[in-house]
Amino acid sequence: MQTHDAKRVEITIEAIVKSRLTDALVDQGVTGFTILPVLGGSGRSGEWSRSGQVSRASGMVQVICIIRPNRLDGLLSAILPVLDRHIGVVSVTDCQVLRAERF
């Protein structure tokens, strides 16, 4: 079975700016993404968890999308302004997809 090169982009960001981030993805032609709640973690400021938060707006989410490699630089440039003033981590990994026409 033939697979095709792609990039998996994972963005962990404050839930309050989720819409700004997904708007930037859509503006870059991303046709699909997945949003997951982040329950907790650890970073430069130490450990944190969603429990004890006053509302879900103050938590974190992870947005995952898969794109063609030639679209990566444009996507990263588009999301950088969203990340500049907020807590966020972006990771990019190589992956393989079966149906390249969907990305």
Image: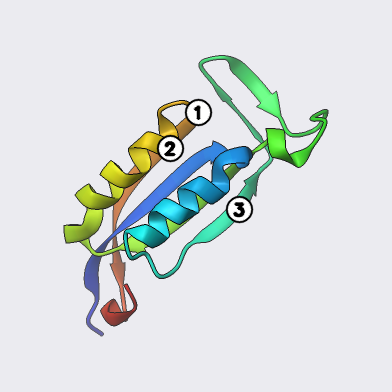
Q: Which residue is mark 1?
A: 86
Which residue is pictured at 46% across the width and 26% down the height? 85
CB under 8 Å between discs 2 and 3: no
- When the figure is inspected, residue 20 is found, relative to residue 83, above or below; the finding is below
Quadrant housing residue 5 = bottom left
Q: Position of residue 69 (x, y in %)?
A: 20, 59
Horizontal side, residue 74 vs residue 103: left or right: left
Please state the total of marks drawn on the protein image.
3
Which residue is pictured at 24% across the width and 64% down the height? 68
Most extreme residue toward the left is: 70
Q: Position of residue 96 (x, y in %)?
A: 28, 67
Residue type indicated by callout 3: Leu
Q: Which residue is mark 3?
A: 36
Quick one: label 3 or label 1, which is nearer the N terminus?
3
Q: CA distance from mark 2 to mark 3?
A: 18 Å
Horizontal side, residue 54 vs residue 29: left or right: right
Q: Position of residue 67 (x, y in %)?
A: 30, 63
CB under 8 Å between discs 2 and 1: yes
Horizontal side, residue 17 vs residue 32: left or right: right
Specify the label residue 82 is tagged with. Answer: 2
